[in-house]
């Protein structure tokens, strides 16, 4: 006989370690956080520019610039720069999205000042060698060819184009003809316009000495020109039902995106919306997952998520389903949404989700990388540490009635955007009940 299941204890509040926030006269900011038990330092230079800042007709110029940034600095070519970082245990990584470009590395703690200096050289004095442009353009074309062969990318692009028509968020697929104009001069002008002290935030987390790191930051950045402040790109999302279909003749699977715009992280309903998502779609034991994966076997790895940007967010369910059940899978997603809109979950079901949501949040803050991720999130949305301190309590305060209200208010299926990458000949009739597919 199995022993009784343990009863979870009281949830632990998430506590961000003490932040050491500093500012320069040019507008640049830095945050130093001592955390962890291993003598390492995670160093991130976050610059508020991303794909949303690229002009129409120049899609992927930001990616081209990121590739160029890896070509070294005015003082060191790519090999010399990589060797300099490797000598202190690090390597350069670059991540980006619609609104941020992040240069980051992880080094031994005593080398945090040197890492800061090296990242500053990349951001402030990149080489952009003329002779590398043809190779980088060829790499960009190969990347696009690979992306266009992936149904997930095609469905994502169609979903974004339908949800954010005419807006940078909806311009996912670039025009490859535009790549011909990408060269060192274009990239240099783009980077000069999109970087600067007002757009920059240095984050350092780990077991390091803050004062030497702060001195290195000040020396590396205090004479950086402020540049322009970050641009705002508030969208006007689509309203009402839209169905987009990208034809993939002969495909045995359909990649399906179903979603709509919801409140962003600055709004009071965002945390209850996270709880509702975990219950409906965003955890392994969520209702949609248990339905279309466990009960019906339509898909292997469905997932629901909230995607946010400044002043904007959307909820989306994503699944790769067998072609023959494309329409049925969408129907079951809608069924679970409408069921939650019509009837509140039980207190027992909600408690399990609250434990999952609050526990996941606390676990994510347990590493330097996780803490820096969270600090980036707070900064992007203009939130303070009070958001973090109150998060677990806000999750625990959500009631079954709140979950039903959230679903009723924000997840109505009548305004869902649906995007499908699949075999039109076999899918068209299946999805006709949800709207006439375009695209």
Image (tube, helix red, strand yellow):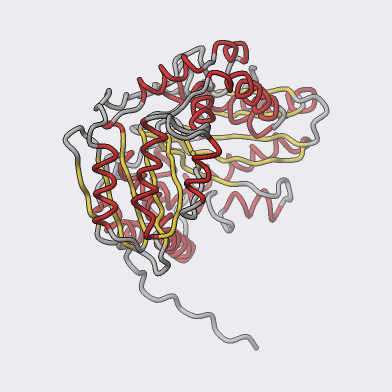
> Is residue 150 placed above or below 106 in the rendered structure?
above
Percent across and percent down for residue 73 are 45, 32
- Left or right position of 244 against 80: right
Residue 367 image-quadrant placement? bottom left
For the N terminus, the image quarter is: bottom right
Identified at 77% across, 27% down, the residue is: 423
Q: In the current view of this chain or complex, which residue is farthest to the bottom?
A: 1
* Position of residue 364 in the picture relative to residue 59 (left or right): left
For the point 75% across and 23% down, which residue is it?
424
**Quadrant assignment for the C terminus:** top right
For the point 73% across and 24% down, which residue is it?
428
Question: Looking at the picture, how far across and down is residue 144, in whole percent?
Answer: 65, 25
Residue sticking out furthest to the left: 25
Residue nearer the viewer, 93 or 397: 93
Q: Position of residue 298 (x, y in %)?
A: 73, 46
Residue 254 x, y percent position in the rendering? 72, 34
> Would you say 133 lies left or right of 117 here?
right
Height in image: 278 above or below 103? below
Please state the total of marks drawn on the protein image: 0
Nearer to us in this view, 111 or 210: 111
């Amino acid at each position: 006989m199995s022993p009784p299941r343990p009863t979870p204890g009281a949830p632990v509040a998430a506590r961000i370690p003490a932040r050491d926030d500093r500012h320069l006269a040019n507008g640049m900011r830095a945050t130093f956080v001592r955390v962890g038990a291993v003598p390492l330092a995670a160093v991130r230079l976050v610059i508020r520019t991303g794909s949303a800042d690229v002009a129409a007709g120049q899609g992927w110029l930001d990616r081209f610039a990121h590739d160029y940034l890896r070509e070294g600095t005015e003082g060191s070519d790519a090999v010399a720069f990589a060797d300099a970082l490797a000598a202190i245990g690090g390597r350069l990584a670059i991540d980006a999205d619609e609104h941020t470009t992040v240069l980051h590395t992880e080094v031994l703690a005593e080398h945090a000042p040197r890492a800061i200096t090296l990242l500053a050289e990349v951001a402030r004095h990149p080489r952009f060698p003329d002779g590398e442009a043809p190779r980088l353009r060829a790499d960009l074309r190969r990347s696009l060819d690979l992306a266009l062969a992936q149904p997930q990318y095609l469905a994502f692009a169609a979903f974004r184009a339908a949800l954010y028509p005419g807006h940078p968020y909806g311009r996912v697929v670039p025009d490859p003809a535009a790549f011909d104009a990408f060269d060192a001069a274009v990239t240099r002008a783009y980077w000069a316009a999109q970087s600067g002290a007002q757009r920059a935030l240095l984050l350092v987390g780990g077991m390091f000495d803050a004062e030497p790191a702060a001195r290195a930051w000040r020396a590396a950045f205090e004479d950086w020109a402020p540049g322009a402040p970050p641009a705002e790109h508030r969208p006007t999302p689509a309203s009402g039902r839209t169905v987009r279909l990208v034809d993939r003749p002969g495909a045995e699977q359909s990649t399906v995106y179903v979603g709509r715009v919801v409140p962003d992280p600055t709004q009071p309903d965002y945390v209850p919306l996270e709880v509702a998502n975990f219950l409906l779609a965003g955890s392994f034991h969520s209702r949609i997952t248990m339905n279309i994966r466990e009960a019906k076997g339509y898909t292997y790895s469905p997932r629901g998520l909230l995607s946010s940007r400044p002043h904007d967010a959307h909820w989306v369910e994503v699944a790769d389903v067998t072609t023959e059940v494309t329409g049925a899978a969408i129907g079951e997603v809608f069924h679970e949404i409408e069921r939650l809109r019509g009837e509140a979950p039980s207190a027992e079901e909600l408690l399990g989700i609250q434990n999952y949501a609050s526990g996941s949040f606390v676990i994510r803050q347990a590493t330097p990388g996780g803490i820096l991720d969270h600090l980036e999130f707070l900064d992007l949305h203009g939130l303070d540490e009070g958001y973090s301190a109150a998060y677990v309590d806000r999750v625990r305060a959500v009631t079954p009635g709140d979950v039903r209200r959230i679903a009723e208010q924000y997840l109505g299926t009548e305004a869902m955007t649906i995007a499908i990458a699949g075999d039109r000949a076999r899918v068209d009739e299946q999805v006709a009940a949800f709207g006439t597919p375009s695209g």
